Image: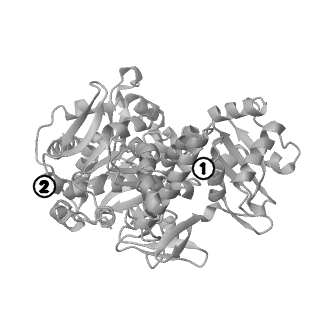
Amino acid sequence: MDRPPTGMLERLISAECADTLPGLFHERVRRTPLSVAYREYDPRTGCWINYSWASMEIRAARFQQALTREGLKTGDRVALCLPNCTDWVSFDMASLGLGLVVVPLYADDSVTNIAHILAHCEARLVLVDTQQRWSELVPHRREFPLLSCAWVRERDVEHQPGDPEHTAKSIQEVLAGTTVSTFKRVGSSHSLATIIYTSGTTRRPKGCMLTNFALLSNAEGVTKVIAPRPEDIFLSFLPLAHAFERTVGYYVAMMGGSTVSYVRSIEHLSDDLKAIHPSVLLSVPRIYERAYDAIHAAAAGNSLKMLLLRLTRNLGWRRFQARQGRMPAPGLAASLIWPLLDKLVARPIIEAFGGRLRVAVTGGAPIPEEVADFLVAMGVPIVAGYGLTEAAPVVTTNSVEDNLPASVGRPLAGVEISVSKNGELLVHSPAVMSGYWNDEALTREIIDARGWLHTGDVAEIKNGRLFIIGRLTEILVLATGLKVNASLIEAEIRRDNLVDQALIVGEGKPFLVAVCVLNQNNWRTYAQEIGVDPYTPNSPSAVGNILMRIGNRLKDYPEHAQIRAIYLLQRPWTVESGLLTPTLKVKRGKVEQIFHDEIMKLYSGHAMFR
């Protein structure tokens, strides 16, 4: 385990000491008031601004005064729809300190989804990023009549609604009359702290009720495996509305007194990694996959570069396995050549991630084994974990010292895992949610009478480690009775640089077909190479070539797991189109519904190509 040095143990705040989330915040301010808590970019000055813990408490206390003026009472739901920023933290802590229930919303979610959540949780107040966002919500006001107040972080007069009654207040307005005062803390460890809505791929979002105790106990469990340090810099770019970023990238960092830096945007991630030099990075697999693809694309066509890449990967993997105690250390010759390979190949990759990472956590979805193995071999300290919002969210994780990239690690302290007869992973944890908001029936479906959470994931447990195989809903049963793990096949297809998004279909059918979204740049280049029109991707020649490429990727899979027909798209699936969740997961049922006719033609054989 990555234990902190003895001298900093007193800097790590325990769940018992904190008692509540605002208690954690208050204790961190008391212990290290002048340390840098957060860092964010100011586009007006072009500079990175540091915020101390003491200044954050002042800001949160002013928010509390503004919230109190709105007539809110303990237990009322307040929602916030902001990109990651210090105001997200200030509003969150201010609300929790007053006993309000915070409902985070994804800043890039659809207006329809946001309106549904505001209505379902009966929010009394919402803080959104821009006036334009509020203007888009105004036509849905009848859906959430209990909302009595809206605040905006950035006022844009061009997007103000005509009806004064529906005009939101700017943060500058609501904080204008506030003064420096004492930060208030009410409630207990078992008080409801937040309702986090899952971005379900098959049904409406469900509101997971999490107490202060659930979130604190989960954060503390993480610190016992990956201990945050005062000198750590966390780089935050995953939405704080997601339980993974909120618990690990926010509350865990607060327990350790670490600094959190908020990226400007995902488009600036590469530049911000080099500017911030983080020591801790939380990411979804797609970021690591893009790095892997870029590295190999840069070496493609150059035999010397490819040779050096393979040598570095193979020797780096042996060195990693030796450090893990799973094989002997490389011999003298290998040790002598490593400094050169490190300088030419591995070090530039490490520098691309900022140059000082001590841990890079991946979660939210499975990371392809070849990607994790490659980056670990290069010295990028990737550790995979597993969790779900209903468990606040971390269930298992690897550590840097005990790391098997093919697995998602071991259970946190106090967490039990088991596998049911049908292969479903069950979880028993102090961090399990209290239930789904306003849905007792669904709560009983997922949490049984003994308190075990039914995750819906198919898993195996080997030597105390957890291996996720797929989702129960993603196990397709063909007409022949044979089963296929859809997520595994889709991941293999996406490894082809021509494919950005993929979905396979086959439930109750004689064979598998796929619907894929092409990578536009790579597709245009490839179409030119094979002599086809890039604007007619479903021509027989284009489809035949891509099916052959996919077949090569799936050559190690059984016959029934092969793709027999494919429909190709050039327009990506997006959150705005309703085909992706805010966490960028494909809404399987929605895609199948929209492309039903095309899929049926693939099966009928009457129009295999268009």
Among the two numbered marks 2 and 1 on one chain, the one whose residue lies closer to the N terminus = 2
Give the residue pinned by disc 2: 31
Can you give x and y, in whole percent of width and height, for residue 239 in the image?
Answer: 40, 46
Specify the quadrant that holds the N terminus.
bottom left
Is disc 2 placed on a helix, strand or loop?
Answer: helix
In front: 369, or 325? Answer: 325
Q: Residue furthest top?
A: 158
Q: Is residue 98 above or below residue 429?
A: above
Question: How busy is the neighbourhood of tag 1: few (under 14 within 10 Å), some, or many (20 plus)?
Answer: many
Give the residue pinned by disc 1: 587
Please give left or right for residue 95 compared with residue 201 in the image: left
In front: 6, or 29? Answer: 6
Between marks 2 and 1 in the image, the one whose residue lies nearer the viewer: 2
In front: 386, or 288? Answer: 288
* Image quarter of residue 170: top left
Instruction: Name the residue rendered at 41%, 61% in the picture.
Output: 393
Can you give x and y, in whole percent of width and height, for residue 297 in the image?
Answer: 58, 40
Query: Mark 1 is on which residue type?
Result: Lys
Q: Is residue 400 above or below residue 450?
A: above
